[in-house]
Amino acid sequence: MNIDPGTEAKAYSKVDWRLIPFLFLCYILAYLDRVNVGFAKLQMLKDLSLSDAAFATGAGIFFIGYFFFEVPSNVLLKKFGARMWIARIMITWGVISSAMMFVTDEWTFYGMRFILGLAEAGFFPGIIYYLTLWYPSRLRSTRLALFVSGIAVAGVIGNPISGWIMDTFSGSLGIAGWQWLFLIEGIPSVIVGVWVISYLDSNIGEAKWLAEDEKALLIHNVESEDKHKTEHKLSDAFKSGKVYVLCAIYFTLMIGLYGIAFWLPTIVKAFGVKGYLSVGLISAIPYGVCVVGMMLISRHSDRTGERRMHYVVNVCCGALGLVLSGIFADIPVLAILFLSIGTLGVIGSMPLFWPMPSTFLTGTAAAAGIGIVNSVGNLGGYVGPNVPIWIKQYSQNPSAALYAIAAILVLGALLTYAFIPKGLHHAKPQ
């Protein structure tokens, strides 16, 4: 098929503007509802008489529920279509997230977090799989960066908003600030979930906003790439050694992500910052740095066609940033600067990682394989919040947890360098 570069660029521009901002919004809401418990912690632990260990267990138990339903959810997404399944996920998690306001003790906290994990399972890998239906690998990292930057933007806008809600509404109608936080931040997910039903198209063929020649071109690009992939059946995903190596690598990355996300407000508050809004504004700085850095790194990765060393170098820089933030913990300005580098090393590595599975998996194997990697890897989300608790048994140094997380990130970088083939990336565009 003869492809006119101008026609191709115009077609992908349409897809970009139609899908990426909307998916970006969805992910901001998803991530905010997942990690706002880290901000609620500043108040709810005292109200409910919860220990730091109980908080860490509850924060992490989300990922146990997530683990059990992740792969089935992604396979069901392929069966029922992205539109209806993503809508189902968003509506249920929004309702459950708001219902977190009714938590009364340690066990209801555990139960609600577990159910929230069940509800949200399949969203992130579902979107990763969904993007493989629209973009060939050579164009995917920058789009993934735009989508994944929802994590960083959720931090930039979500932390100050969370702080404002808790400062403004605490005690209103006899409801605590952390309860208002859960209630208010869960509602937008339900609204956008309903919007998904009328807005998203499950595949290129359903897109009425594309001309027929544009559809043909986009389908050709995706199908041409899929012809070169050897693993396409459900069983292929479970038999692939590369899938399990990627699980281990992603596990280390998620320890870093949620070790930072759930404890960042606490770390900032320990600097002596007063007021929830002030804590939120300062907590937003590392995420703001991450938004810019992630886009620059991902564009360079797309331009060069290289993923492996981009990932290794960025993760190692992030680990160094965490170490230095611990060393300079007594100098808040430097601590935040290096924590920003650490956050970029973790979140900024996600769009470098996720094009890897789809370079050798397609069809049902891609849906299942991405689900496997995300579900197993996200068990690191249980480990990450618990690292500070476990480390306290061996060291009273308040920065020891950052050093431990940095070491885990370096281990993931070494696994990537040792076991991911140099050829496991897309070809440079001609």
Image (cartoon, grey):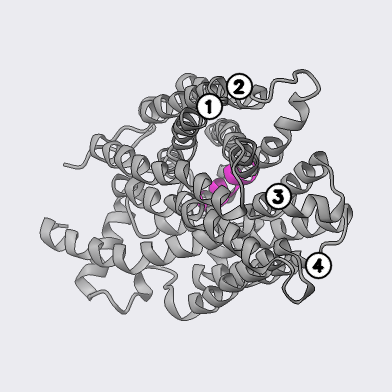
Q: Main secondary structure of the magenta part?
A: helix
Q: Nearer the viewer, residue 17 or 152?
A: 152
Three-letter amino acid code of the residue under disc 2: Tyr
Q: Is residue 211 magenta?
A: no
Look at mark 4 in the image and give the residue it sits on.
Answer: 102
Q: Dot 2 lies on which element?
A: helix
Residue 24 appears at what percent x and percent y?
43, 60
Look at mark 3 in the image and give the residue it sits on.
Answer: 42
Three-letter amino acid code of the residue under disc 4: Phe
Q: Nearer the viewer, residue 408 or 126?
A: 408
Look at mark 2 in the image and give the residue it sits on.
Answer: 403
Q: Residues within 10 Å of mark 2 (few under 14, many from 20)?
A: many
Q: Is residue 363 above or below residue 14?
A: above
Q: Dot 3 lies on which element?
A: helix
Residue at point 54% right, 53% down? 125
Q: Is residue 193 above or below residue 29?
A: below
Q: CA distance from mark 4 to mark 3?
A: 17 Å
Q: CA distance from mark 3 to mark 1?
A: 22 Å
Q: Earlier in the sequence, mark 2 or mark 1?
A: 1
Residue at point 65% right, 37% down? 380
Residue 26 appears at what percent x and percent y?
49, 64
Quadrant hosting residue 17: bottom left
Q: Which mark is on residue 322?
A: 1
Three-letter amino acid code of the residue under disc 1: Leu
> Can residue 2 be seen in this snapshot?
no
- Tag nearer the camera, 3 or 1: 3
Q: CA distance from mark 3 to mark 2?
A: 23 Å
The residue segment tinted magenta is 366-376
Quadrant in the picture for the C terminus: top left
Q: CA distance from mark 1 to mark 4?
A: 35 Å
